[in-house]
Amino acid sequence: MAWELVNGTIITPRDVLERGAITIDKTRIAQVSKSSRKSADAMQIDVNGMLVFPGLINCHDHLLGTYVPRVGDRRPYMNWLEWDNDLKSSPVYAERQQIESSDLYQLGGYRHLLCGITRVQDHIPHFVRELFAKNMPIRIISDFAMAHSVTSYALKWGDGIELEHAKAKEKNIPFITHCSEGFDEETLKSVETLAAKKALSKQTVLIHGIAFSDRDIEMLAEHQCNVVWCPVSNLYMFEQTARVKELMDAGVNVTLGTDSPMSGSFSIFEELRTAREFYRFAYGREIDDHLLVDMMTVNAARAMCLADAGEISEGKTADLLLIDGNSTNPWASLTHADYADIMLVIADGMPRYGDIAFAPVFDAMKIPYETLLVKGARKILAGDALELQNRVRRAVKYRKELDFLPIEAA
């Protein structure tokens, strides 16, 4: 069934279309136009000037790590392994192990859906994700080659850097690895190691990059590589983050990632606030809101080799985010948004989450939903997040508060 959003402010995100209309047919955007006539064939939803963005893309998470509180008694760390050792020996890790892995995945999916994220890259071996990521509320990016990281103490994920990168180039899929996440001698040489293995290309996606040197940045730009910036996780674990302005000035494609809430942000809203604060502190100026939106849309789609995502245009997958905001500077409205501002999230052409005002749309499309409070705002969700929350509490045998999932029964 085709249906339409009309009277919206559409941010493609390159351009702004006032009083625009989007026709959705099955899972795809069939048409984007400046206006829409009354249609006898398609249900029309008047969104009354709401801002319409492409669904957001989170380029780094570990969904099995969707739990709190953060771990890090010995910060700042020398490398990721020191933190991982603290994680594995912590009481909260033992508590997390009481929860079904499939439920941790669901927590991660709902955590992102409530913020307008419709796709996420889950950095873990494919066989693990395939075991537990069932019936997710958002799409998990699954077509990529990978390594865990570049050092000798990296986890043995994938078939080795050379083979995995060759696979990425052959299939035009991303080759994704943690890189330069720390300050030991091996970590500092991560980009050099990748260059020696001929693993730098437009398919290469490097997560974190807090120790990139000037020469590293030159090489990444030369080979059209991509970097995932995770400021909350980096600043928490290492008290340092990527040299994001230098990367962008060199022409490196930069995206955003939340990492897991056991070291990273609870939401993309927190990630955006931290990104702005860090940029202001490090460079003495404000980061352009348009750049931040690009990091979560067009830049992310480019890094993840997603030809169907990141923009609002005909033929793209109908992943859309509607927010309440000011059309004078819609990019700032998104980068300063919070839970209450999320009005509707559409994934693969179907409403998944939104404000209570959109209940008639869910009803008309026969989409079952639950009503809940999200930070006090009445919302509806195509899913069962409240029962998931209760399952987690039963598993750990107390009323666990999950800061990244601020829901309660309405």
Image (cartoon, rainbow, N blue to C red):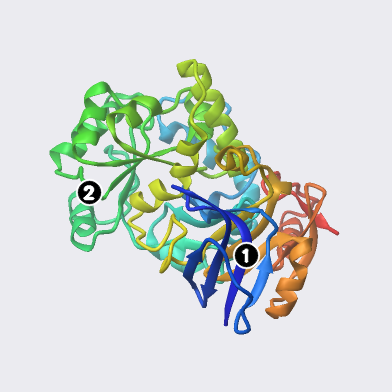
User: Quick check: 241 left or right of 375?
Assistant: left
Residue 348 in picture, x, y percent from top left: 52, 69
Residue 118 in picture, x, y percent from top left: 53, 58
Residue 249 in picture, x, y percent from top left: 32, 28
Q: Residues within 10 Å of mark 2 (few under 14, many from 20)?
A: many
Q: Nearer the viewer, mark 2 or mark 1?
A: 1
Residue 304 in picture, x, y percent from top left: 36, 54
Is the residue 60 above or below the residue 272 in the image?
below
Q: Which residue is mark 1?
A: 6
Quadrant the C terminus occupies: bottom right
Q: Which residue is mark 2?
A: 161
- Amino acid at pointer 1: Val
Q: Earlier in the sequence, mark 2 or mark 1?
A: 1
Q: Secondary structure at mark 1?
A: strand
Decide if residue 89 is in sight here.
Answer: no
- Residue most toward the top? 284
Quadrant the N terminus occupies: bottom right
- Amino acid at pointer 2: Ile
Question: Residue drawn 53% across and 56% down?
Answer: 55
Q: How far separated are the C-alphas under marks 2 and 1? A: 48 Å
User: Quick check: 344 left or right of 57?
Assistant: right
Camera-side residue: 250 or 31?
31
Question: Residue drawn 62% across and 44% down?
Answer: 327
Is the residue 320 above or below the residue 205 in the image?
below
Decide if residue 83 is in sight here.
Answer: yes
Is the residue 281 above or below the residue 402 in the image?
above
